[in-house]
Amino acid sequence: LAKTTQPISMDSYEGQEVNITCSHNNIATNDYITWYQQFPSQGPRFIIQGYKTKVTNEVASLFIPADRKSSTLSLPRVSLSDTAVYYCLVGDPSYGGSQGNLIFGKGTKLSVKP
Amino acid sequence: DSGVTQTPKHLITATGQRVTLRCSPRSGDLSVYWYQQSLDQGLQFLIQYYNGEERAKGNILERFSAQQFPDLHSELNLSSLELGDSALYFCASSVRAGYNEQFFGPGTRLTVL
């Protein structure tokens, strides 16, 4: 089974840039890497998705190296409201990639302090 | 608001009982996913349906079953409940089967006493 590894927790201060890295060996050729944000007692919320190199949207950037065995979510100038758990999602190649068993990482608990 | 609805919000029941959780996907989404989230296990994928057909299975127990109906709403049935089944159960939907941008509902909190 594919396995993802993320730091359990990170601390930051308001206004700083935060980078969260996810390691994902055995990622399938056709898989995409997706990041979600989750607040307590709420369902996860889609942040960004990418296949390779760099993707940017209005809230985050995603950096993926050529070997695709890791990815880095970058949150620019975080605020207190960015305090949440961030999950890295990749498809499981044992079940045919992103159309099969979907595996969330353990998540990274980001705490933003004033 | 993601557009995905789940009922009920809270459910308290006893061991050995059976419950049904309901999910209505976003309008136009054909794929429905079920997840279980407990404190010690994190977010666990249970099962996926696409346009009425089972598409993928994750760590779903044999005591659990699900289905997706012609109107695309889905139900997750949990039977012979145990204390360890207490968790948040999320439903998510997406447009396509292999599309990782999923929209999650607010969840159903199940407490088994």
Image (cartoon, rainbow, N blue to C red):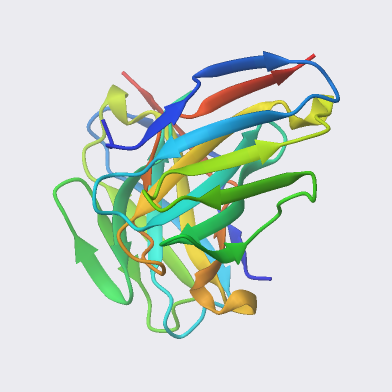
> Residue B45, percent across and down?
60, 52
Image: A79 above or below A20: above
Q: Residue furthest front?
A: B70
Q: Nearer the viewer, residue B84 or B69?
A: B69
Percent across and percent down for residue A38 are 42, 35
Tell me if B55 is positioned left or right of B96 in this view.
Answer: right
Viewer-proximal residue among B76 and B58: B76
Q: Which residue lies furthest to the left in this view?
A: A58
Residue B2, horizontal then vertical, whole percent: 28, 37
- Establish if B100 lies above or below B37: below
Q: Residue at x 85, y 25 (%)?
A: B16
* Residue A57 placement: quadrant: bottom left
Quarter of the figure with the C terminus of chain B: top right
In the rendered image of this protein, does residue B19 appear above or below residue B36? above
The image quarter containing residue A52 is bottom left
At a point 41% along the width and 62% down the height, the residue shown is B51
Q: In which quarter of the image is the N terminus of chain B?
A: top left
Q: Position of residue A48 (x, y in %)?
A: 29, 55
Q: In which quarter of the image is residue A34?
A: bottom left
